[in-house]
Image: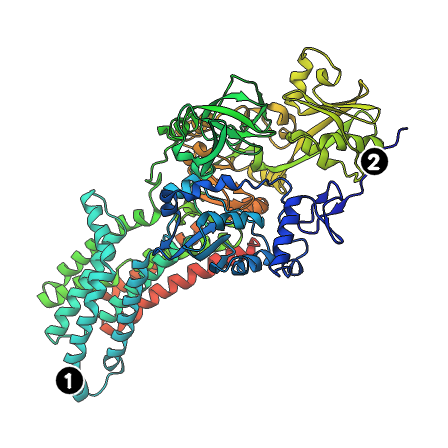
Amino acid sequence: MPEFSTKTEIKCYHCGEPCRNHDITIEDKVFCCNGCKLVYEILEENKLCKYYSLDEKPGISQSERKINTSGFAYLDDEQIQKQLLDFTDGKISSISFFIPQMHCSSCIWLLENMYKLNPAIFYSQVNFPEKKLSVRFKENEISLRKIVELLASIGYEPQISLNEVEDKVKSNVNKRLYYRIGVAGFCFGNIMLLSFPEYLSFDDSISFFYKNFFGLLNILLSIPVILYCSSDYFKSAYTGIKQKTINIDFPISLGLAVLFIRSVIEILTNSGPGFFDSLSGLVFFLLAGKVFQSKTYDALNFERNYKSYFPLSVTIKKSGEEQCIPVSKLKVGDRIIIRNNELIPGDAILFNGTANIDYSFVTGESIPVGKVAGEIIYAGGRQTGSAIELEVIRTVSQSYLTQLWNNETFVKRDEDKFKSLVNVVGKYFTIVIILVAALAFVYWYPTSIKAAINAFTAVLIIACPCGIALTSPFALGNAMRILGRNKFYVKNTSVVERMSKIDTIVFDKTGTITKSGDSNVNFSGGLLTSFEQRIIKSLARNSTHPLSIKICDAIKENELFETNSFIEHIGKGIGGKIGYYDIRLGSRSFVLAKEMEDEIDIVDMLNSKVYLSINNKLRGYFVINNIYREGFEEAVNSLKHEYDLSVLSGDNEGEKENLLRFFDDESQLLFKQKPEDKLQYIKKLQGKGKKVMMLGDGLNDAGGLKQSDVGIAISEDVSSFSPACDAILDASMFSNLVKFIQFSISTKRIIITSFIISVIYNILGVTLAFQNTFSPLAAAILMPISSITVVLFTVSFTNLSAKRRGL
């Protein structure tokens, strides 16, 4: 047995990652790379080493990050700066960065102490839930590029994408709605105060003295309520009439209009105190319901596209020199340099280097594809391995990826595919109430015209469907809040309603039902000795191929050896010498040094088998299988009795046997599905009358997610990229999928029950109004009580339903 130089694993002082060698040190501190050492030196120099005392090993590993300062040259472009900056007056500028590496209190502390690194940065504040950093700086003393370089040097390089520059996300908070609810609340409170003489029945002299004055004040206070606060209801009702439909806003508008007109007439003719307290109270509650319903997750973006993935700049080679330019300025014929783990922004031909392209971004296929000089590489592919040189033949806007994304079939129309239950109820409710009001008028007309008008208007007032209108926003809005608390973020309340109607569920495979980056690695061929495991790991750690990385991570040996004569043949395998041992990992023909691939190689490729030979002797093979998400088996078992289930995958059929353990019929499993295939499959199901929910995680699922009735993006980090969708589900909560669907069904039942309560109230109120015994005091009590009852019922029972399910 020859002697080998061994290395015991030591953790990096900065990031906690294993150190491949022990040569990079400062005093007794060992670092895994020069990048981590540099960050430590920067913090030490600026007396910021408290960073390490707040959390254990808080740093981000710099071992695979090579900071190329020329890569930020595009930030010197004035046009790019204007698009990125939030504010500038020529002296002071402010900007917000998305920092995905932010993960602990140490990160927050360091980023909020940036002024110690450079005094020209006088303000920096972290929004941790959104992973955003707001920075204000003196433009004459430090440039935007220098700030980004500073952040990158300490391990917090901002994520700046092409999509952010072209369409910078703005806050979608509806300020007008808050203004309206403020005005309605102010008027409601003051009208109630001015109505106390009527409520408390003061003696006639005081009532007579103040009645007209208070009544006129109430008219003035109610004018902004009817003209400003409730204007959206009148606009919606008018729009519905123009389209020859009756929505829920029509009876609400009718009731509010009649309430206002009758109240004005009563006060001006001294025939009554009016119903302004009820009017302002109802508008206030309706607007409060809108706020509750429209509350969204501002930190999340549900409308992302392929540009959210793309970097803002690219390195081009011109006259033998490399320079960085914005991707938007990339032209046909440009030579570009793509390094390890970088995305290819446009369709291009490979000129130099060894390409190993990961197309999972576009197709879902998880195994990289080898390319040789002269082959076309399409936009969206990610290079794994050494740098390559390409010539652009189609820019970002003309690439295959862009054409795919902009295909008409990928566009999901904004209109809902279902009629809201509230609007259906509102339509028939309006017809019935108008008929009842007309009957009341006819019934009381022989008595007197005044009694007939009172009865007619009283029916319209008391039957205003505000209770019904409040049911949906408060129930669905509270459901949104509960789902969000459980890391399931829905785009709007209609998603909850659509979830309750689904009958078919389609899963993407890679990254959705399987854990991203995690695999089960098993060796077939007898037990490997500790020494054999060490030499295998020593070889595998030299490769960036995903299968090599998985094998390396699976072997827990810490003492490693130096590898000599390392070779890597794209699509075939890797090899090298460790002492007297010739080690090979890869396809069967490669490890046995055959010239041509055979049929066994094709089968092995499908099943992710990696063969091992030591000194040209076949030792066995590694089988690499996906790890399914926790709770997936239980979810499928619970759902398959009530829903039609399918799996769509861009991968090959290597996982078919494993999936058949969960699904009864192999016709439910479809492989080698392109993005357009997934979309067409969803459309085919919908053509059969199915209500489809799809769960996916990448751009290759975007078409299906857009087409489905409910599209859910699974994300390991909800702040990072996910395709356009109706909802974002944190991957850690996948096991609760069944509970979320059941909860949406319960919420719909609560809404229906609340409708019944509102109808009972309206029958009681209409009965009183029909008898012409409807007093202002009764209106002031009954109408708000109806609204409050509905709100309390829906919120309480949705909370109870969630609690029963452990949400």
The answer to whether one can see residue 754 in this image is: no
Q: Decide: is 788 above or below 361.
A: below
| Pointer 1 with pointer 2, Cβ within 8 A | no
Residue 130 location, x and y as percent? Answer: 49, 53
Q: Decide: is 743 above or below 183.
A: above
Q: Label 1 amino acid?
A: Phe
- The residue sitting at 71% across, 27% down in the picture is 623
- The residue sitting at 38% across, 61% down in the picture is 790
Question: In the rendered view of the protein, which quadrant contains the N terminus?
Answer: top right
Query: Image quadrant of residue 355?
Result: top right
Query: Image quadrant of residue 614?
Result: top right
In the image shown, does 487 or 765 lie closer to the viewer?
487
Secondary structure of the residue carrying numbered label 2? loop
- The residue sitting at 72% across, 12% down in the picture is 594
Report the number of numbered marks: 2
The residue tagged 1 is 208
Q: Decide: is 28 above or below 646.
A: below
Residue 599 location, x and y as percent? Answer: 67, 12
State the mark number for residue 5. Answer: 2
State the mark number for residue 80. Answer: none
Residue located farthest toward the right when viewing the structure as drawn: 1
In the image shown, does 269 or 566 lie closer to the viewer?
566
Q: How many residues crowd mark 1 within 10 Å: few (<14), some (14–19), many (20+)? A: few
Q: How is the image coloured?
A: rainbow
In the image shown, does 748 or 233 lie closer to the viewer?
233
Q: Label 2 amino acid?
A: Ser
